[in-house]
C-alpha cells in the first residue's frame, strides 16, 4: 500500500482534561476547554485523529446515582454508554468546520488482523482529504481485559489504544506525531519540566524514580504507564514523535502547533 504523503496528527485527551471536579467529587463537563481545543483543531491543515477519554466521566455528570449497581466494572461500563454520545456531540460542536466520525474500538480490534485491516482501509480512504476527523474512544461498554488487566481498571485512559493506532497509522502516512493532553505541564524531574527525553534514557527504573516524586503532578501511575507505552511505541517506530502537554491549557496546544517549545517531547 502506497503511503499518504501527509503528516497525521493524533491528539489524545485524558478524562481530567475534559471535566472539572467540584465539591464532594462531583464532576462537571469543561465545555470551555473542549471548545477552545476544538477551535484550534479546526485550524489544523493536515489530517487529524482525536483519541478522547471521558465517556465514563461524562456519564457520571448525567447519572451519578447508580449506586444500586454493586459491581464497579459494570457500573463504569454503563456510565460509558451514557457518556459516549455526549462526548461525541461535544466534539462535533467544538470542531464545527470538519466532519466528525465516532469510532468505538477496543485494544483487541487493533491487534486482530481482520479488524485492524478494516480500520486501516477506512483511514486510508477517508484521509485522502483533510476535512474529516475520526474521534476514537475505547469501547468500554463491551471491554473486559483492557479495563481490568491491561489498564488495571483505569477506564477512559486510552494510552494503549493511542499507541496501537499510531503504529497502524505509521504504515499509512509518511509522518505521524502524537500529542498527549494530560493534567501535567509535561514530564517533571526535580520540579523542572523535561523539554526532551530520548527513549534510550527511559529505562523502567528511571521512569519509576521520576514518577514517584511527591512534588510533581507527573507522580501518578498514569504518567508512568504513559512513558512506558510511548517509549515502546517509538522504539518500534522510531520516526514517531510524542509530545506530552497540559490539556487544561489550550494555549499549550496552540504553541505546539505553531512549532513552539512546550511540554515534553519524546523521541528516538
Image (spheres, grey):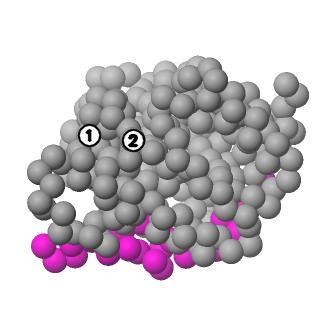
Q: Mark 2 or mark 1, which is nearer the start of the sequence? A: 2
Element carrying mark 1? loop
Quadrant hosting residue 178: top right
Residue 151 in the image, given as x and y percentages of width and height: 32, 35
Horizontal side, residue 119 vs residue 212: left or right: right
Find the magenta span and give its range: 18-46
In the displayed structure, 256 sits above or below 207; it is: below
Nearest the eye: 237 or 256: 237
Task: Tell me which residue sits at (33%, 30%) in the image.
Answer: 145
Nearest the eye: 117 or 13: 117
Label tally: 2
* Residue 153: image tag: 1
* Residue 56: image tag: none
Horizontal side, residue 203 vs residue 211: left or right: right
Front: mark 1 or 2? 2
The residue identified by callout 2 is: 142
Residue 253 in the image, given as x and y percentages of width and height: 57, 62
Amino acid at each position: 500500500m502506497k503511503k499518504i504523503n501527509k503528516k497525521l496528527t493524533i491528539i489524545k485527551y485524558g478524562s481530567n482534561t475534559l471535566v472539572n471536579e467540584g465539591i464532594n467529587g462531583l464532576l462537571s463537563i469543561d465545555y470551555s476547554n473542549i471548545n477552545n481545543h476544538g477551535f484550534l483543531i479546526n485550524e489544523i491543515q493536515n489530517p487529524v485523529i482525536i483519541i478522547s477519554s471521558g465517556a465514563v466521566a461524562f456519564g457520571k455528570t448525567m447519572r451519578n446515582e447508580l449506586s444500586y449497581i454493586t459491581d464497579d466494572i459494570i457500573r463504569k461500563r454503563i456510565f460509558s454508554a451514557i457518556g459516549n454520545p455526549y462526548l461525541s456531540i461535544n466534539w462535533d460542536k467544538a470542531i464545527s468546520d470538519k466532519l466528525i466520525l465516532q469510532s468505538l474500538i477496543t485494544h483487541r480490534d487493533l491487534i486482530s488482523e481482520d479488524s485492524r485491516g478494516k480500520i486501516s482501509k477506512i483511514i486510508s480512504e477517508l484521509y485522502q482529504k483533510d476535512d474529516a476527523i475520526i474521534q476514537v474512544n475505547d469501547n468500554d461498554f463491551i471491554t473486559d481485559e483492557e479495563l481490568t488487566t491491561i489498564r488495571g481498571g483505569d477506564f477512559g485512559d486510552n494510552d494503549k489504544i493511542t499507541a496501537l493506532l499510531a503504529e497502524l497509522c505509521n504504515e499509512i502516512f509518511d509522518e505521524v506525531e502524537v500529542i498527549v493532553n494530560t493534567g501535567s505541564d509535561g514530564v517533571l524531574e526535580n520540579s523542572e519540566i523535561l523539554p526532551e527525553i530520548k527513549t534510550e534514557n527511559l529505562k523502567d527504573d528511571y521512569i519509576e524514580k521520576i514518577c514517584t516524586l511527591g512534588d510533581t503532578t507527573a507522580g501518578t501511575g498514569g504518567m508512568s504507564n504513559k512513558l512506558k507505552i510511548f517509549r515502546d511505541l517509538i522504539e518500534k517506530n522510531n520516526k514517531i514523535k510524542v509530545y506530552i502537554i497540559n490539556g487544561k491549557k489550550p494555549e499549550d496546544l496552540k504553541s505546539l502547533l505553531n512549532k513552539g517549545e512546550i511540554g515534553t517531547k519524546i523521541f528516538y
